[in-house]
Image (cartoon, rainbow, N blue to C red):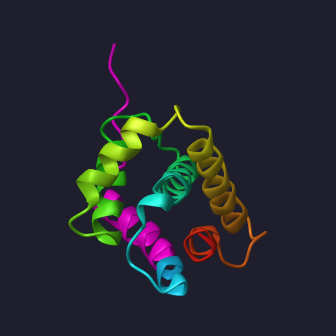
């Protein structure tokens, strides 16, 4: 049985990472920060995970695919939080699906991306709101 070869190659991944990172960087800039305080890690990283997951799904990719989800998430975290990407990825892996607060943030981030993608939201700002409100 042959497996369908994905057209989501390195160049497409780079473009995807750049585009999604930019949308999230805008939110960090609006919040006036480039860091996540420890008390906000669950909600902020959950939002980012959900946002990335929804963006992947809209192009027919799956976060659960180990050749896509982990490397793409790592590269986005690396662009947003240089030097903290590995810690944040490990934090996500340790908490995703196990923490109700994080899962709520995952749903929020995902829904914001979908609403933005469908033209129902002018600009996704849930990450900024989370970081500002604390």
The quadrant holding residue 55 is: bottom right
Instruction: State whether residue 3 is above or below residue 93.
Output: above
Give the residue at x 55% y 72%. Answer: 131
Residue 69 placement (x, y as % from top left): 38, 43
Q: Is residue 88 visible?
A: yes
Give the residue at x 75% y 70%. Answer: 119
Residue 96 placement (x, y as % from top left): 48, 38
Q: Which residues are magenta?
A: 1-25
Say whether residue 132 is left or right of residue 28: right
Question: In what quadrant of the picture does the N terminus appear?
Answer: top left
Q: Is residue 9 visible?
A: no
Who is closer to the viewer here, 35 or 2?
Answer: 35
Q: Is residue 124 magenta?
A: no
Residue 125 placement (x, y as % from top left): 63, 74
Instruction: State whether residue 1 is above or below residue 113.
Output: above
Who is closer to the viewer here, 79 or 54?
Answer: 79
Say whether residue 82 is left or right of residue 80: left
Instruction: State whether residue 93 is above or below residue 38.
Output: above
């Amino acid at each position: 049985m042959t497996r369908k070869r994905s057209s989501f190659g390195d160049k497409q991944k780079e473009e995807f990472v750049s585009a999604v990172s930019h949308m999230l960087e805008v939110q960090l800039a609006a919040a006036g920060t480039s860091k996540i305080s420890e008390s906000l890690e669950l909600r902020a990283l959950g939002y980012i995970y959900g946002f990335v997951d929804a963006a992947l799904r809209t192009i027919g990719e799956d976060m659960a695919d180990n050749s896509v989800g982990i490397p793409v998430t790592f590269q986005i975290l690396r662009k947003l939080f240089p030097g903290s990407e590995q810690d944040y990825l490990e934090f996500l892996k340790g908490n995703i699906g196990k923490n109700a607060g994080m899962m709520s943030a995952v749903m929020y981030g995902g829904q914001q991306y979908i609403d933005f993608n469908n033209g129902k939201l002018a600009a996704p700002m849930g990450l900024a709101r989370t970081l500002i409100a604390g």
